[in-house]
Amino acid sequence: MSASPGLPLMIVDDDDDLRDALADVMIAQGYEVAAFADARVALAALEGGVTPFVILLDLMMPGMSGWEFRAAQLENPTLSLIPVVVVTAAGKLSDGAHTLSNVEVLYKPFTLEILLPVVARYAAEPQAHSGRLTD
Amino acid sequence: MPWEGDGPTDRILMHLAEIGAGRCTITDDTVISERDPEMSQVLLGLLVLYEDLSHASRQRAEAETALRLVAEERECLLEDRRQAVAARDEFLAVAAHELRTPLATLALIVDHLIVPPLHQSTSELGSVVVQQRQLAMLKRQVDRLTALAAEMLDVSRITSGRLQLSVGSVDLRDVVREVLDRFDLEVERRHVTLRVDAPDPVPGVWDAARIDQVITNLISNALMYGAGRPVEVSVRVEAAQAVVVVRDHGIGIPEDEQSKIFGPFARVLTTTHHAGLGLGLWIAQQIVQASGGRITVDSRPEQGSTFTVELPR
């Protein structure tokens, strides 16, 4: 069973191992995965037509940060509809948190028990959450 | 004015008014040359009064200055303390961040290995390969956490003056080669060209493990901040010293930041995150200094950084 026929799950995280681990567990759950170490490349992929049902977004990344990625995503009316779940090791969201209002946050480390239902919820209702994401 | 006349009362009132305004025209000569002995006594009394008042006023000014200095010193100490508390809080935030990331990977992979997934599409052989890769991933997280713990222990050793070197005969060129060998995979992964210039053995008496730690830190930084451009490492004997130079051509360090990089908790927790506790260069400098040497940096933004370690032989 693929919970999201045709739509991949996007992972944006600069930590190679964590990104691979997330990709592994999600692929094992039957999801298609598009994983990116660089937020700029991920954004370009979105602009190029990749349409994930949800984006798991790290915040603190070299180059383009998660906050900058989110701000750029919100500027594009089509891309802004794609739900984002922030996955962060930071204790608080602080700077630029306004672009992350109404965004679900998972604080690292989290268990599969926590992660899977969140992803499954977005997979079951692709873009149903978009209404509360556009401020 | 009422004392503009030249009667004795007018003169006394005039002098009192002057003294009240913080000045005095009575001098010793005025007192001596006064023909009226009573007036001479009064003038002397006024002069003494003026001098006493001036002295008291000077003492008060001095006391006020001293108080102000104490207040300024106190403010400085408070500011130092505020900065120390801020640095500690920031360190704790960075340390927590650095611990959480490998823990997140560990948590996911362990869960994944314990709970069989609903959908396993890979073949048995494929799943063995995946599991091997995931076990290697686990091992790397354990290594990361071990390295973090070692770094924190070093901080505690250094700040309490317990950093001890265990010196022996070492070829610095061998140390550098061993470090570079450990970076093989990372160099390959980052597609970085690493050039090494180490024509001759560089024998000396140092703590090999600690010098290894210093070189490891410099190479790791050069790869992390080197923007994928070539990194050059040289080891040679210059005069009576052993000199290791690690040069990258990456993002560099702004001039006003250069004095801070060897301080503890140097790297600020920013949104553009680079991994690590921000303690590596501070620990490196402590080790090099404890070895009787010095470590310096020459850097320009967007042109790269050159770190030079000089060790006495």
Image: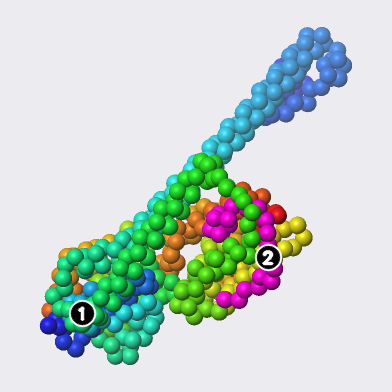
| Residue B311, position as x, y percentages in the image | 67, 56
Span of residues in magenta: B194-214
Q: Nearer the viewer, residue B156 or A45?
A: B156
Residue linked to disc 2: B201
Q: Identify the subunit bearing mark 1.
A: B
Q: Is residue B165 above or below residue B115?
A: above
| Residue B293, position as x, y percentages in the image | 66, 53
Q: Is residue A43 above or below residue A101?
A: below
| Residue B308, position as x, y percentages in the image | 65, 63
Residue linked to disc 1: B124
Identify the residue shown where x is 17% and y is 79%.
B120
Q: Are marks 1 and 2 on the same chain?
A: yes
The reply, left or right, for residue B252 in relation to residue B34 is left
| Residue B261, position as x, y percentages in the image | 56, 59
Identify the residue shown where x is 77% and y is 16%.
B43
Q: Nearer the viewer, residue B176 or A8?
A: B176
Q: Residues within 10 Å of mark 1 (few under 14, many from 20)?
A: few
Whether residue B41 can be seen here: yes
